[in-house]
Image (cartoon, coloured by chain):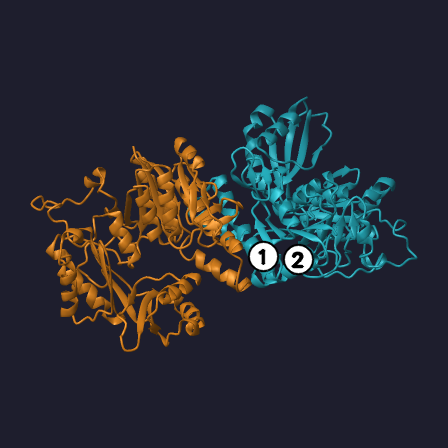
Chain colours: A orange, B cyan
Amino acid sequence: MALVVQKYGGSSVADASSIKRVAQRIVATKKAGNDVVVVVSAMGDTTDELLDLAQQVSPLPPGRELDMLLTAGERISMALLAMAIANLGHEARSFTGSQAGVITDSTHGKARIIDVTPGRITEAIENGQIAIVAGFQGVSQDKKDITTLGRGGSDTTAVALAAALQADVCEIYTDVDGIFTADPRIVPAARQIPHISYEEMLEMAACGAKVLHLRCVEYARRFALPIHVRSSFSQRVGTWVAAEPPAWAAGAKPTTSDSEGSEMEQPIISGVAHDRSEAKITVVGVPDKVGEAAAIFKTLAAAEINIDMIVQNVSAAATGRTDISFTLPMTDGPAALTALKRIQDQIGFESLLFDDQIGKVSLIGAGMRSHPGVTATFFSALADAGVNIEMISTSEIRISVIVGQDEVDAAVSAAHHAFDLDSDQVEAVVYGGTGR
Amino acid sequence: MALVVQKYGGSSVADASSIKRVAQRIVATKKAGNDVVVVVSAMGDTTDELLDLAQQVSPLPPGRELDMLLTAGERISMALLAMAIANLGHEARSFTGSQAGVITDSTHGKARIIDVTPGRITEAIENGQIAIVAGFQGVSQDKKDITTLGRGGSDTTAVALAAALQADVCEIYTDVDGIFTADPRIVPAARQIPHISYEEMLEMAACGAKVLHLRCVEYARRFALPIHVRSSFSQRVGTWVAAEPPAWAAGAKPTTSDSEGSEMEQPIISGVAHDRSEAKITVVGVPDKVGEAAAIFKTLAAAEINIDMIVQNVSAAATGRTDISFTLPMTDGPAALTALKRIQDQIGFESLLFDDQIGKVSLIGAGMRSHPGVTATFFSALADAGVNIEMISTSEIRISVIVGQDEVDAAVSAAHHAFDLDSDQVEAVVYGGTGR
């Protein structure tokens, strides 16, 4: 008997009939002999509708009250889901984030989980009940106010709760079959990845793969909790995010031909991720003195802007000046430009360039540690596809390049093909997802 | 400086613009130097929409989960109201029933308040904040589950909270100007009542006056808390429900002509209430033996049916049998008939009659204690209007009669006129309510 934590997103509980379908899946898991704890998001468009109401009442609503408002969304979906399960003859109890013991700091709108004390959930499990927990929400430790966790919040709730309960697995249900080697809308031959390590998944999430949020993967890695990303619209096995593929998952996996041992076939590259949400700022003509770059990035940090890649070219000896380029979320562009304008005289740089027509393409794979020449193969493939590289950044298991936004598709396809990821070359795995 | 608890119903916060209007009224009360605590219901049709969703998911949802679902309604309205107040430059904090310390028993759907421990509300007041509290909801003492208080729940929350906070007044805002001597839709000359005692208001509420619910009046009487029922759509003084009209209200009252002292003019009758929601069951041919009536009403009590009026006529000597008639909520009719059918052989009665075409008309007034002849005047007025009386029931400050449902209007008008309640005969008070 296993303890399974399942998380269903908003699209899986969009209306009454979806909720009933999800209830059947939950009951099936329970009937198979598992203890089940479910984390649920708000129904479909509920959050947007509530935000719209808030906007009608106040242009800049206080964070505390906005959190109080938005948490009504999961309250509705979790109560309905508990009803639907009861209707199938199983006992279910819904719990708010506060009741489930999700303790956070006081940062409304993007609170961080400090502790999880799931006493009431444990009690429900011991009573043979299915516990339904509101995702995305918690209660602040000091003020006992309702908080929300921000982007990827429900996934984080599920993983944090699973870790606290020492669950065997956290199943994240979504509208695609799992994590793919590339976005199937760009690369039709992309394969679903059966297993991926936490480190690789972290790089994938950080580089634009949208199925799992960075935060929840970080949490899972810290507690060595296996995540199973799968579709709520099919019974297929999805992608296991774990240090090792768990033994009891191996039996459930689609059988591969015995002639090819899986270890022999471990690909160098796990996947190709891309991200069109960044922009590039270039600070032109920065005096080449000690501390100037530090002053620039201190200013950006003070404005709470997250920088991704940074490139500084060699100072031209004639002028004693250099250019510094960096990428950042496109939406932070105006704030960054404003902050930099304010220190132009102090730093003495010449001008600012802003380019939001860029895209980031990243190769991710623990296998590249032991395979030299990955960078050469990657860059050759891009060159053959006629793609120009603007910036480069690497980690031990990742290579990212910045290219023109309209060259992203060509770059992703070229890289996917160059590293033998295309499905007809490795193994045929049927997938039906939409690629998000 | 006074502590004012204000309660706004669903029609007062039906949409964003209504919420903004209510926020202005609350801020005006605060600016006038009062501490303000607000109890709010769910927006307009929210509760019905949530019930409809529940119905789509489950025909018979568990009470615990239905309460969890419905309490999302006040969560939304209270957060929006707090935002609207913040927008006007005043600090507001919303609190769920649980956060406000509304402790109840575990009867989901119609929980009773056991205790109110409003520590967080007191703290908010001390910090100069306006506290917004979700009406209708609480948390159960033993299981810490979310509960709802059932019909009239938000009024009860407001009065219970006001009592616990030792507030100076509980203002109940509604869509009419106060309590009227009769339903103005039936009696256009009906007057708004400036002051009414708890006992009279209890009888009015029990006899069909819908503005205040019985429970909240009972609560207010127990704690001697003055209630001020008034319209959220005007600035007019409404009806004070209190042992005595409070001194600081007297100054705000519409001036009456000095030639008529208010004590001299105290009317015998405070108002005429009516109720079309009851039905009558007659148990025909009950053997006239000791204990037969007891057996009938024990059976009805076991089926949790509330009986209102009971009449037993004299036994016919020839047959040794009698008829017993009683009234009950129309909706309980089928359950009552089923329960009685089951004991027909045991009791040996002949048959059951069911009549849902009845109405109850009640005269209420503490003044009738010291005025003999009220019954005679009442019955004469009904006779002159051609209204036949089917059943009669009296208390010290009330006389109720059951009449045909289509004679209710005529009976109410005749009684109102016979006891000089018509506005042109006593004093002209302008009213603008719709009578509900």
> Where in the figure is residue A429, as x and y percent of width and height?
17, 52
Q: Is residue B372 visible?
A: no
Distance of label 2 from label 1 (alpha carbons): 10 Å
The residue indicated by pointer 2 is: B26
Q: Is residue A160 left or right of residue A140?
A: left
Q: Are marks 2 and 1 on the same chain?
A: yes
**Where's the N terminus of chain A, which quadrant?**
top left
Depth check, front residue: B54 or A99: A99
Q: Is residue B19 above or below residue A41?
A: below
Q: Secondary structure at mark 2?
A: helix
* Three-letter residue code for mark 2: Ile
How many numbered marks appear? 2
Question: Residue at coordinates 43% horizontally, 42% vertically from top-left?
Answer: A115
How many residues crowd mark 1 within 10 Å: few (<14), some (14–19), many (20+)?
many
- Image position, residue B234 (x, y; %): 70, 61
Q: Amino acid at mark 1?
A: Leu
Q: Are marks 2 and 1 in contact (CB under 8 Å)?
A: yes
Q: Which chain letter goes with mark 1?
A: B
- Label 2 CA crowd tier, 10 Å (few <14, some 14–19, many 20+): many
**In the image: residue A75, left or right of residue B392:** left
Which residue corresponds to mark 1?
Answer: B81
Label 1 sits on a secondary structure element that is helix
The residue sitting at 59% across, 38% down in the picture is B103
Q: Residue at x 56, y 44 (%)?
A: B99
**Label whose residue precedes the other's in the sequence (2 or 1):** 2
- Indicate the chain on which mark 2 is placed: B
* Depth check, front residue: B174 or B279: B174
A157 displayed left or right of B185: left
* Left or right of residue B171, residue A141 in this image: left
Q: Residue A351: give its label.
A: none
